[in-house]
Image (cartoon, helix red, strand yellow):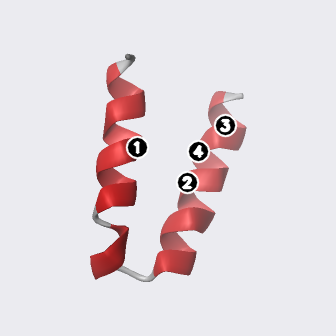
Amino acid sequence: MPRQYQVELLILSHSRSLNNTSVLYLHSIRLGVHT
């Protein structure tokens, strides 16, 4: 798997310690940028 994808998984795995909505929002932006 691409390292970038692994990084995203790490971010999602730590989303519980952050604001879940904010993490999903940032994640969706990253997907939009990479796409």
Quadrant in the picture for the N terminus: top left
Residue underneath mark 2: 27
Q: Secondary structure at mark 3?
A: helix
Tell me which corner region of the image, top left, top right, bottom left or bottom right, holds residue 6: top left
Q: Secondary structure at mark 2?
A: helix
Sequence order check: which comes first, mark 1 or mark 4? 1
Q: Earlier in the sequence, mark 1 or mark 3?
A: 1
In contact (CB < 8 Å): disc 3 and disc 4: yes
Circles 2 and 4: CB atoms closer than 8 Å? yes
Q: Is residue 22 left or right of residue 5?
A: right
- Give the residue pinned by disc 1: 8
Q: Residue at x 58, y 44 (%)?
A: 30
**Separation of residues labelled 1 and 3 (CA atoms):** 13 Å
Q: Position of residue 31 (x, y in %)?
A: 64, 40
Q: Residues within 10 Å of mark 3 (few under 14, many from 20)?
A: few
- Percent of width and height locating residue 16: 33, 76
